[in-house]
Amino acid sequence: MNQAKTFFLMVFLTIIFVALGSMIGGQTGAYIAFMIALIMNFVSYWFCDKIVLAMYSAKPVSEKEAPQLYSIVYNLSQKASIPMPRIYVIENESPNAFATGRNPSNGVVAVTTGILRILNRDELEGVIAHEMSHIKHRDILIQTVAATLAGAITMIANWARFAALFGGGSSDDEDGRGNIFSVIIFSIFAAFAAMLIQLAISRSREYLADEGGARLSGNPLYLSGALKKLSAGIALTPMNNANPSTAPLFIVNPFAAKGVLALFSTHPPMEERIKRLEEMAYRR
């Protein structure tokens, strides 16, 4: 169900992107917008791991430096039948973790010092299993493409509104281009829809990774216990220096969204994630 949902959301995101380009510049505009997306996706695909690791000053660690973490990653990679990911640690007291890398052969698991401090071995295994599931199912690629398309749509939509307001846009539909009012209205819709679709894709992949990680670790309660601690830990020590564009990568939202802001969180409601994991455990 979530796999199909992700596919259709990605298709819809692409349609919005092409339609926006077409409205601004007709057929030529659609081609230009598509080329921009290709270039952005190329850069994101090949360099996403290096960019995000540098962003958080993550440091690689060896088996000697982090024996327990290394053991967990090694054992789970064997169970998942994927190459062992590289392991990085981020000096930050906010408890969190993420996976990156364009495919399983280039996988990376990064954890903060805060998560290593508050989780026991079983809970840490649940978290790492979740990240392994992301790597195995190439979620990083999906989320990177979604984020790139959404970012491109927002950028072009902002440019379109500026051009329509101050560039004296055409009042007719020559060559498939919309008039000034339709361009402004559609650009606003496109930016908002792109954001919602990106959030929906991120949430779908988180549910899948929770389920996959629970099966990989062998006990859904490992991850549910970890999520309870992480939720409390983030509330006390949010990662305020985190880049919003990387929020979907983390196992929990680094900004501890509350109230209305939680509706626009990149992650599903924590209560629902924990509920699903506990239901999995009781069905065993």
Image (cartoon, rainbow, N blue to C red):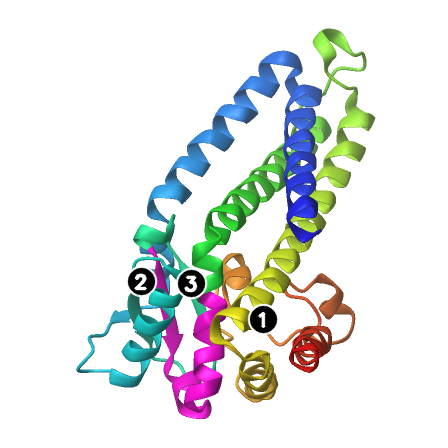
Mark 3 element type? strand
Secondary structure mostly taken by the magenta-highlighted segment of the chain: helix
**Above or below — where is 73 with respect to 168?**
below
> Mark 2 highlights which residue?
85
| Whole-percent x, y for residue 6 in the image | 65, 46
> Mark 3 highlights which residue?
99
Q: Is residue 241 visible?
A: no
Q: Nearer the viewer, mark 2 or mark 3?
A: 2
Disc 3 and disc 1 in contact, CB within 8 angstroms: no
- 205 vs 41, left or right, is right
**Above or below — where is 41 with respect to 61?**
above
Identify residue type, mark 2.
Answer: Pro
- Is residue 130 one of those drawn in magenta? yes
Magenta span covers which residues? 107-131
| Whole-percent x, y for residue 105 in the image | 31, 51
Name the quarter where the C terminus is drawn. bottom right
- Is residue 36 one of those drawn in magenta? no
Residue at image coords 58%, 81%: 227
Q: Nearer the viewer, mark 3 or mark 1?
A: 3
- Choose the circle earlier in sequence order: 1 or 2: 2
Identify residue type, mark 1.
Answer: Asn
